[in-house]
Image (spheres, rainbow, N blue to C red):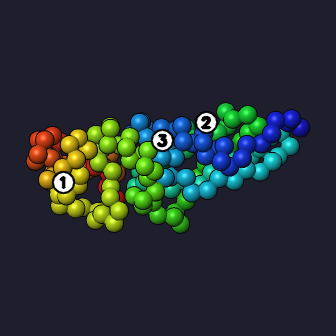
Amino acid sequence: MSTLTAPTPAQVRAVIDTVPDPEMPPVSVGELGMVVDVRVERGGDGAHVAIDLVPTFSGCPATRVIREDVTSAVEAMDGVDSALVRFVADVVWEPERISEPGRAKLREFGIAPPGSGQQLLSIGGVRCPLCGSRNTTAESPFGPTPCRSTNHCRDCRNPFEAIKP
């Protein structure tokens, strides 16, 4: 029997907050608001941790990598014997789930975070992460990843990406 103390759900969430999103490395899975639930059960050899996540975009190709990275990070914690990470379909990810630090990191990375209640394919009006202007146009709903679109700022004349809401 393990003498290590099982971590709390808050401690597990703190570790998940260090796992970068593979498509936007400056931002963590936790900062993107992907964590739905964390359950810790004490077992004979150590804690068994179950984590429910929601993808930011339906059909996200990075879910396998995210699952592996979160599993590895949690299983490396003292007192954890195993971790089960699953993506749930009964919760819908919404832009409001992104934390303020996560939004700031997205802007620093040159990606416009979605606003509250923003339409899926808005025509302009997305705030430029480089200069802050809303004088922007949507160039294409298709960006380098399925969850991002390409845009152009008329004021600073720079292209930028935006997360699709």
Looking at the rendered image, the quarter that the N terminus falls into is: top right
Amino acid at the residue labelled 2: Ala
How packed mark 3 is, by other alpha carbons closer than 10 Å (few <14, some 14-19, many 20 or more), is many
Which structural element holds mark 3?
strand
Looking at the rendered image, the quarter that the C terminus falls into is: bottom left
How packed mark 1 is, by other alpha carbons closer than 10 Å (few <14, some 14-19, many 20 or more), is some
- The part of the image, by quadrant, that contains residue 3 is top right
From what the image shows, is residue 52 above or below residue 16? below
On screen, residue 160 versus residue 154, left or right, reads right
The image shows residue 44 at horizontal and vertical percentages of 86, 43
Residue hosting label 2: 73
> Which residue: 81% across, 48% down?
42
Amino acid at the residue labelled 1: Arg
Amino acid at the residue labelled 3: Ser
Distance of mark 3 from mark 1, alpha carbons? 26 Å
Residue hosting label 3: 28
